Amino acid sequence: MGDLKKRVLAGCFLAPIVAAIFCFLPPLWFYIFLAAIAAIAFYEIAAMSGVKGTWLLVFLSVLCFIPLYSKHYHVYALWLLAAPLFYLIFRLLQGGGREEGINEEILKGTAVLLFGGVFIVLPFFTMYHLKELNTLFPFIILLALWASDICAYTVGKNFGKRLLAPQISPKKTVEGLLGAIFGSMIIIVLFHRLLDFGIAKALITGAVMGILGQAGDLLESAGKRLCHKKDSSNLIPGHGGILDRIDSFIFTAPFLYICTIWRT
């Protein structure tokens, strides 16, 4: 079966399930769901980096969710500093001080912890806050990013000529980026009343979300190129791993949250 068929079949099966979760789960269970998804993404990042102590990195990263949920933000900030320290001690106790390449591995492990703690935990935390504001807000982000991806693919495939960032993502084009902007704008405009946005604010928010979604994808692609990987994993047939599916939320979720609470 070709990759496109796998992608379509997996999408048809998973899309309704994911949509229902984003739409109907109450805030607490949605937060638990996000933490579970984050744990898988942390594992993919650690596995791609090739460092030892993968499960320790996952455990340390997921712990970030606890102080955030309890609103002990100072503890979360301290944990971002403490987690790399724990990993350093763990590797030294393993005799890592005598291993060749230990310097690079410790720095990679630290990078995994910081990336997970900042670029996965914080966006997901803002998704939880959006769920608290209105149970449908995370669903709106999901629809906007789906529309953005579909339009980016369609426009890029049919009209794409100018490469956007060939060294990072060889298939992305400037025309595809314009399609991504258009797709997210449509969804935000459609839901502008629910979001309590004026039309102008909806258009600007949708356009920026289209750009930020592509930026998150480029950031994750840069990480995969650094690790010499095509996908973060093979968990979802035709789609790659969890990290490949959530990268668009990295910048868009915090941005939409700011837009919803910022009143002018």
Image (tube, rainbow, N blue to C red):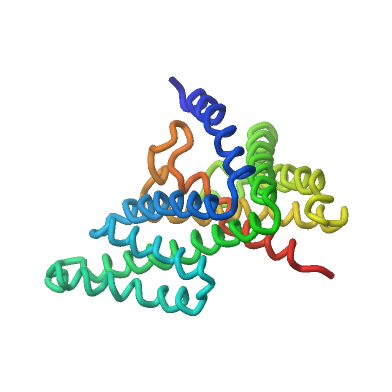
Across and down, in percent, residue 231 comes to 42, 43
Q: Nearer the viewer, residue 230 or 25?
A: 25
| Residue at image location 14% in from the left, 67% down from the top | 94
Residue 214 percent coordinates (x, y): 61, 51
At 53% across and 33% down in the image, what residue appears?
A: 14
Image quadrant of residue 108? bottom left
Q: Residue at x 72, y 48 (%)?
A: 181
Please state if 221 lies on the left or on the right of 147 as rendered. left
Q: Position of residue 211 (x, y in %)?
A: 67, 54
Q: Is residue 92 above or below residue 19?
A: below
Residue 198 vertical placement versus 103 (above, below)? above
Residue 172: % across, % down: 59, 44
Viewer-nearest residue: 109 or 171: 109
On the rendered structure, is 168 left or right of 208? left
Tell me the quadrant of the picture where the C terminus can be found: bottom right
Q: Residue at x 26, y 73 (%)?
A: 88
**Vertical order, 139 against 131 (above or below):** above
User: Residue reaching furthest top?
Assistant: 1
Q: Quadrant of the N terminus?
A: top left
- Direction right: furthest residue: 199
Q: Nearer the viewer, residue 166 or 6?
A: 6
Q: How many marks?
A: 0
